[in-house]
Amino acid sequence: MNSFELNKILGAILGTCLVLLSLNITAGALFSPPHIDKPGFAIAAKEEAAGGGQQAPQAVQPIETLLASASAEKGQATAKQCATCHTFEKGGPNRVGPNLYGIVGANKAHLPNFNYSGAMKGKGGDWSFEELNKFLANPRGYVPGTNMTFAGLRDSQRADVIAYLNSLSDSPKPLPTAQAPAQGGGGQPPAQGQGGQGGGQAPQGGQQHR
């Protein structure tokens, strides 16, 4: 192979490289991605309620209404999902959560041998039926900072579980019942007088109030 043929081959290779480089530059100009100021991922977040505050928590059904149709037997079956963290028998050991025998009516941090969270200790008060109802609906919403990671129970399940927990006692408490609406006309406005008999009419011009 003489030098002339070698130069032709090298020129063809160089020309091919120049064509490929030109195509690469042109493609980059046409299909360049948009510039991103800060790398990362877009995260969808819930919009705040009007006024910039957080949305109000959903109202919890009164426990008196829920307990009207509660079943302790169904509550025992539902409570099996809690057995990973709690025991229910009298004198049972603590696990991740405290033993729950006698919980209804007891202080919120009722066991001296269990290390409750500071949030639970600071909540104070007793586990009444209504307090248990609010807590089991949304544990972390009702006691912010609690170590309990359970998401909560819906209405009928809460009532059943609370009825079951109430049965775990030497002296179960009577279940609260909803009060019937008051009868009578105590809250009704007085009847208006008739005709010209002034019983319910405003006093006339020259008369004075006593």
Image (cartoon, helix red, strand yellow):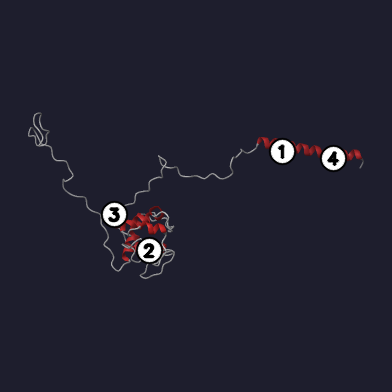
Q: Is residue 130 left or right of residue 52?
A: left
Instruction: From the top left corner, tell me how far across and down residue 118 is, in percent.
Output: 41, 58
Residue 8 visible in rendering: yes
Residue type at mark 4 is: Leu
Give the CA separation, mark 1 to mark 2.
68 Å
Residue farthest along the left direction in this orientation: 197
Instruction: From the top left corner, tell me how far across and down residue 137 is, in percent.
Output: 37, 54
- Location of mark 3 (residue): 65
Q: Quadrant of residue 11?
A: top right
Instruction: Name the quarter where the C terminus is drawn.
Output: top left
- Mark 2 or mark 3, whichever is nearer to me: 3
- Location of mark 2 (residue): 77
Q: Nearer the viewer, residue 196 or 80?
A: 196
Q: Which mark is residue 10?
A: 4
Residue type at mark 3 is: Thr
Give the CA separation, mark 2 to mark 4.
84 Å
Residue type at mark 2 is: Ala
Instruction: From the top left corner, tell me how far across and down residue 40 is, in percent.
Output: 57, 45
